[in-house]
Image (spheres, coloured by chain):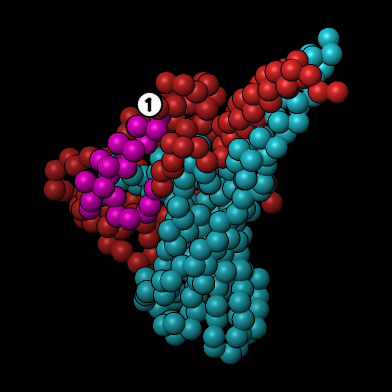
Amino acid sequence: MITKGHVLWGGVGIGFGLSLGIGVATLVGRWSGGETARGRFTTSTAAAESEPARVVHTRTIVERIADEKSSDETDDEVAQAAPESTQEDLRAEFESDIATHESDWRDPSWAPSAEKNLTEQFGSTPGTHKILGVDCRSTSCVVNVEWPSLAEASRGYTALLHQPTEPNCASKILLRPAEGDGRYTEQLVLDCTEARAN
Amino acid sequence: MKHLTTAIFAGTLAALPTFLVFSPSDSFAAKDLRSGCYERFTNIEPVSGFGTTCVVPDSSSFRLSDVTDLNVHFKDTRSGSRASGYVRAKACVQYFNSTGGACGSTANASAYTAPGTPSVSPSTSQWTTANLGHFKYIAATALTDQGGPWVEPTGFFAYIP
């Protein structure tokens, strides 16, 4: 026998259940990184340096997302979506990599042959650069490269990054702001940890 | 007490379908990204090789820092045997706010007989959360003294478990 009480309390229960279902579904969506109403952002390899307007636009989007997240989401989520490294962060990280390399010990069974190979391989990479020297330790190497100018370096550094090498190392380079029109030297840092582990 | 039981029963019945309707469909699913490169090799090494790049989009719904598998596929339309390392690829980052970038180690394809569709799995060691805002791409190269459209990357596949 269905009474008024059944109808009343059943309605309360259904209302509570609907709210609970929507609330849990929303939380699950946020925790799992699923799509939310706020939308997405996408980055692209389109020539960043030659399109300053796009860079500003991209940064604006990234910062906006970080701002939105900081307003109502957890610290972990903000950390995951933190905007890219600043120029200072990149410079600090790059110099830290070089410092780590310089403090490493030199493996006499590996470093000389690696230096010889890398000098030949980067020396034959197409471009206007000149290899001034290669210094290898136990799991890393630093290649000193010179270009006729910063402009030439800006055009030519990717050829060095893409150069397959033996030993097979990860590579990183960061050019400094202009310091005149003269010859430009920079260091290419190679992390050969994976290659040495294999 | 009887009314409370009724309320709990009705609420439970309502909550489950409501959750299923409103929960994001991809909340628990693995994700993958496939894209064609649509770029043929250009001659970057006048004698010994050719190369190109494939743009890889990084988004809040598909973070490249979470990718565990990356496969880059090529198409070689000429006949002949190809040595190990004939095609190869690296997963790279170009800094958006500075001039520079980084690449992971090179993945070399095993030897194969053309025509064929070799593939490589480059390391994504540079697609980190620290590089979240920077631009990701794949640098694909082929050793060939003939170049042209005979060998080209056809696309890539990225997987997040």
User: Residue A26, relative to residue B140: is it above or below?
Assistant: above
Q: Which class describes the residues within 10 Å of circle 1: few (<14), some (14-19), or many (20+)? A: some
Q: Would you place residue B107 above or below residue A92 in this image?
A: below
Q: Residue furthest top?
A: B1
Residue at 52% over, 67% down: B155
Could you tell me what secondary structure mostly forms the magenta stretch?
helix
* Residue positioned 51% across, 21% down in the render: A75
Residue type at the position of mark 1: Asp
Residue B122, horizontal then vertical, whole percent: 58, 57
Q: Nearer the viewer, residue B83 or A140?
A: B83
Give me the chain that's cyan: B
Residue B22 in picture, x, y percent from top left:
61, 38
Residue at image mark 1: A67
The foreground one among A63 and B2 is B2
User: What span is in magenta?
Assistant: A43-67
User: What subunit carries mark 1?
Assistant: A
Query: Residue B159: x, y in percent?
Result: 62, 53
Q: Is residue A127 above or below residue A135?
A: below
**Front-lying residue, A144 or B92:** B92
Locate residue B80 relative to residue A101 in the image: left or right: right
Q: Is residue A57 magenta?
A: yes
Is A173 within the magenta? no
Residue under the point 30% across and 58% down: A156
Which chain gets the red colouring?
A
